[in-house]
Image (spheres, rainbow, N blue to C red):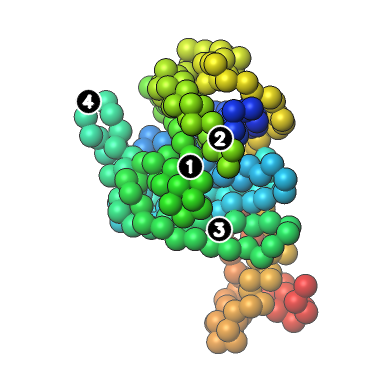
């Protein structure tokens, strides 16, 4: 996982920029969930996007994304937290390829029309959720639209996942550029031109090293590196959290569970299984919350 990282830059001309390299953690998710190529592309983009949106220059912040479309993938979830950890899953992970041209996956069609739900978490305020209509299902376009329309921050998001012939992830990552209040209008034109020259993120990651990518993105601009943080796939599930959820169930559902010899719970994010015998379940339900 040493190659996966999130770098943050402040550009003197009034921009902030984050670059996420997420190849290894995307491959980990693909193998864990046995994802089809189009599911890998959608989830890989969503996880990189969540990491980029969780970028906060002042506070430790977490972000949960849910792409709730009517396409064959169903819902696509991605959570980023503690500034450098991410997890995610796809409702229908074995969805077959959807094409919009020769050898061109149509992630937008696989996600479909629907809503994007974004929940932000911070130590300084209560979590808050925003819902906005999906504009394309292409993940990056939807996140750009969300930041520009809902949070009113002029932004550009580029995300990508490139798979090898055997399905393994060859490259994955993303870029987020946001305008600060004092942005120089010429800087906006310059960063747009630099992004065009860079092209698709995964192609750049395949053909260039990080220093070359940065040089292309910041041509004629003045960038200062603020932080460079390793990013990893990690789930937050635990036996204790599942126990708390069991205690919160209605009494009728608790009684129904106690009728079985054992209860098995599976985490959607990491596929970990938790098994409680009837006696253990009684102990859990009898324990006080917290």
Residue 109 lies, with reference to residue 91, above or below; the image says: above
Choose mark 2 or mark 1, whichever is in front.
2
Q: Earlier in the sequence, mark 3 or mark 4?
A: 4
Q: Quadrant of residue 225?
A: top right
Q: Quadrant of residue 84?
A: top right
Query: Disc 3 to disc 1, how far (Cα)?
Result: 19 Å
Q: Are marks 2 and 1 in contact (CB under 8 Å)?
A: yes
Measured as percent of width and height from the top left, residue 74 is found at: 37, 54
* Residue bearing mark 2: 183
* Residue bearing mark 1: 154
Query: Disc 2 to disc 1, how far (Cα)?
Result: 10 Å
Residue at x-position 73% and y-position 58%? 123
For the N terminus, give its image quadrant: top right
Query: Disc 2 to disc 4, how far (Cα)?
Result: 40 Å
Query: Disc 4 to disc 1, how far (Cα)?
Result: 33 Å
* Residue bearing mark 4: 102
Q: Residues within 10 Å of mark 1 (few under 14, many from 20)?
A: some
Residue at x-position 24% and y-position 35%? 99
For the C terminus, give its image quadrant: bottom right
Choose mark 3 or mark 4, whichever is in front.
3
Residue 88 showing in the rendered view: no
* Residue bearing mark 3: 119
Q: Earlier in the sequence, mark 3 or mark 2?
A: 3
Q: Earlier in the sequence, mark 2 or mark 4?
A: 4
């Amino acid at each position: 996982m040493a190659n996966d990282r999130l770098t943050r830059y402040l550009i003197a001309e009034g921009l902030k920029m984050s670059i996420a390299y997420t190849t290894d953690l995307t491959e980990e998710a693909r193998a864990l969930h046995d994802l089809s190529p189009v599911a890998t592309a959608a989830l890989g983009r969503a996880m990189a996007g969540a990491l980029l949106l969780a970028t906060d220059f002042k506070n430790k912040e977490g972000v949960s994304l849910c792409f709730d479309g009517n396409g064959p993938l169903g819902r696509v979830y991605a959570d980023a937290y503690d500034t450098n950890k991410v997890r995610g899953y796809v409702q229908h992970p074995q969805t077959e390829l959807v094409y919009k041209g020769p050898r061109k996956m149509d992630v937008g069609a696989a996600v479909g029309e629907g809503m994007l739900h974004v929940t932000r978490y911070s130590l300084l305020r209560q979590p808050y959720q925003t819902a906005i209509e999906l504009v394309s299902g292409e993940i990056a376009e939807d996140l750009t639209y969300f930041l520009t329309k809902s949070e009113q921050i002029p932004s550009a998001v580029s995300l990508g996942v490139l798979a090898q012939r055997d399905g393994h992830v060859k490259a994955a990552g993303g870029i987020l550029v946001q305008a600060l209040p004092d942005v120089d209008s010429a800087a906006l034109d310059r960063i747009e031109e630099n992004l065009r020259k860079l092209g698709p993120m995964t192609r750049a990651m395949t053909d260039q090293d990080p220093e070359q990518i940065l040089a292309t993105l910041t041509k004629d601009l003045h960038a200062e590196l603020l932080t460079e943080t390793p990013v990893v796939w990690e789930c937050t599930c635990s036996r204790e959290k599942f126990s708390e959820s069991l205690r919160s169930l209605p009494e009728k559902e608790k009684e129904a569970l106690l009728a079985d010899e054992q209860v098995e719970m599976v985490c959607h994010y990491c596929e970990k299984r938790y098994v409680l015998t009837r006696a253990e379940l009684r102990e859990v339900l009898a324990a006080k919350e917290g």
